[in-house]
Every structure is written in structure tokens, then in C-alpha cells.
Image (tube, rainbow, N blue to C red):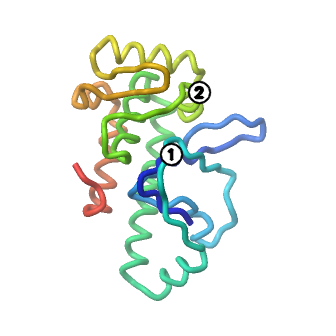
Amino acid sequence: MYFPTTAIVSLLYVTEAGESTEIAVVGNEGIVGVAVFMGGEPSPSRAVVQSAGSAYRMSAQRLKDAFDRSRPVMHLLLRYLQAMIAQTAQTAVCNRLHSLDQRLCCWLLLVLDRLRGSELVMTQELIASNLGVRREGVTEGALKLQRLGLISYSRGHIRVLDRRGLENRSCECYAVVRKEYERLLPEEVAA
């Protein structure tokens, strides 16, 4: 089990053909390895560090023991799992119904919430893989957001210049996911 403190981890679902798309993003609010903790074997998803940083590591058995012994730990972990399920479900809706521009805005906001800053370093290839699109689509989307004055973008560096504008261009998925995390983990989510 990993508890990111400054790292951002993408949970990707990988098909038999090797294609992948992000199903959830985990930062300082969460845990990587929930399937093992919940008693299942590792799932067909893959965890990929998208922004380097630090994390705490704990054996799954030790966390299972804490879950069994402590009601507050159990409730916190179950609330986190519920928030993560909501994020995964909303990601599926978003990937199916919304434009690449909206999805890119939503994704940037979700990542930035977990970084607690306004800048991220990430390749177009990684962003494209997370969104399940071609790299050229990410380039086009990022340049469009830059022309609108919402971000500054160059060679894997993205800095948000107008967060409110990014929120306005995003689909409703960002607000839905953020509200769920705020509702279920109120002390862990900062505005």
C-alpha cells in the first residue's frame, strides 16, 4: 500500500492489446493498492507515477489489521473507497460524453488539486495515455487553452494561469468528483 504525500499516481486500466486509459488519479488524499487491501488480488489496472514525489509505504496486511481493529480507520478507508469509486464512474461518463477540451480541463484540475499548486511537469505522451487519446490531441488542446490565457504550456511544463477559467471550460465531471471528495473526506480536501 502506498500513501502519496507529494507524488501523483494514475491508475490505468490496460486492455489485452496493451492500450490504456486512466480510471482514477491518486494524490495526497488517497491510497494506491486498494484492491489488495480489500482482499482481492491485484486488478488489471496499473499504477503509474505521473508526477514524482514522496509516498509512505505500508504492508497490505498491516493496513488490513488496522482496518479490522479500528472503527475510525475502517470508516475513513471506506469513505475514501467510495470517493474513488465515484471518481472512476465519473471518469467513465466523462470519457464517453465530453469533448477532449473539457476532459483535459477536468483532468488538469483533478491533478492540480492533488499537487496543491499551479504547475505540473508531464509529457504529452503521459497525458495522452491518461486521457486515452492521441498525443496530437493533447498538443492541440493544450495550445487552445494557452491561446485562451488559461494555461502556460511548453515542453512538458503546464502552469495554470486562470483556474476559474479552467473550471468554467471543464465539464461538470470535475465539480462532481470534487464535491464527492469534499463530502466524504472533508478534512483531507482543501479548497
Name the quarter where the N terminus is drawn: bottom right
Residue at 35%, 31% in the rendered image: 171
Q: In this view, does 117 lie above or below 46?
A: above
Residue 114: horizontal and vertical position, in percent? 37, 48
Residue 113: horizontal and vertical position, in percent? 33, 45
> Looking at the picture, which amino acid does disc 1 mark?
Ala
**Of the numbered discs in the image, which one, if any, rests on residue 177?**
none
Q: Is residue 164 above or below residue 12?
A: above
Residue at 43%, 61% in the rendered image: 82
Q: Is residue 93 above or below residue 101?
A: below
Residue under label 1, please give it: 52
Residue at the farthest bottom position: 69
Mark 2 vs 1, N-terminal side: 1
Foreground: disc 2 or disc 1: 1
What is the quadrant of residue 29 in the picture? bottom left
Residue 28 is left or right of residue 123, and the answer is left
Front-most of residues 115 and 25: 115
Residue 3: horizontal and vertical position, in percent? 48, 62
How many residues crowd mark 2 within 10 Å: few (<14), some (14–19), many (20+)? some
What is the quadrant of residue 70 in the picture? bottom left
Q: How many marks?
A: 2
Residue at 64%, 49% in the rendered image: 46
Residue at 44%, 18% in the rendered image: 141
Front-most of residues 185 and 111: 111
Residue under label 2, please give it: 125
